[in-house]
Image (cartoon, rainbow, N blue to C red):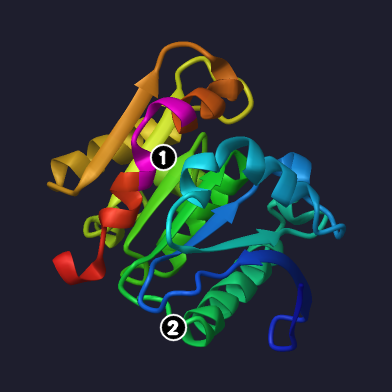
Amino acid sequence: MNNIDKENGICLRYRLRACKEKGKPLVTYFHGGGALGHDNIKQLAEFRMMGGGLTSQKATILLPQAPLGTNNWLPGHVDTYLSAVKRLIETLTEQNSADKNRVSLVGTSFGGCCTWQMIWDYPGCFSCAVPVMGSLAESWENFSGKNVDITRLKDERLWVAHSADDNAVKIEFDDLCVKKLHELGANVKYTRWEKYGHKMHSKFYRRENWVDWMLSQSLDDR
């Protein structure tokens, strides 16, 4: 499917598995860097490799595809993409009569960065988020310099996952952010492994009970 977002000047390609029942959760999966493009296929293939536990649930699943070049993190590129995704989520929530209080995010690598960025840009809008091997890339320099107010995220429900030996997306941001959020008493789970590098996501998605945790979260509980 295509969504022409005139406000953001982007044609957003996406796949959707709509739940026939009303009042069910809506989950958005952000793909990794290898699925960027305009074919509207690669993000679906990636999701099928990790989302088996999710596809068996009664939920609407959105798989947007980021255009080529989005992952260079130049000013405006990611913001435009994520703003278009946010608007699409709002539209689909209405069209599919999904539960507005159970709209969640999950993403891998580049998608993990997008997941962090979405909850940073739109705090209080999502029931929970699962950033896997991600980082708040655009704010990392300021964040590590302690110029970013992390209290912005203190009410977010997060399950962060990363591996210490990840050489593609460094773990330092997740370590620092989780530490600060725990100090604030935030509801944050952290799966931190010492091995598996930038391939830990496949094991995380298979081993951990992230699907049940994600679908059990609601804005009503805050």
Q: Nearer the viewer, residue 21 or 44?
A: 21
Residue 148 at what x, y percent from top left?
36, 54
Which residue sits at x=59%, y=38%? Answer: 109
Label 1 secondary element = helix
Residue 53 is labelled as none
In the picture of the structure, the residue carrying the numbered disc 1 is 144
Left or right, 169 with respect to 140, comes to right
Write the residue at 50% across / 81% down.
96
**Looking at the image, which residue sits at the far top?**
195
Magenta range is 206-211
Dividing the picture into quadrants, the one containing residue 87 is: bottom right
Question: Which mark, residue 97?
Answer: 2
Image location of residue 137, percent across then percent down? 55, 46
> What residue is shown at x 79% (from left), y 60% (from top)?
67
The amino acid sitting under disc 1 is Ser
Mark 2 vs mark 1, CA separation in Å: 40 Å
Q: Is residue 30 left or right of residue 208?
A: right
Say if 167 sits above or below 84 in the image: above
Q: Earlier in the sequence, mark 2 or mark 1?
A: 2
Magenta-colored stretch includes residue 208: yes
- Vertical placement of residue 127 versus 20, above or below: above
Q: Amino acid at mark 2?
A: Ser
Q: Tell me, yes or no, whether the highlighted magenta stretch contains residue 184.
A: no
Q: Residues within 10 Å of mark 1 (few under 14, many from 20)?
A: few
* Magenta stretch, main secondary structure class: helix
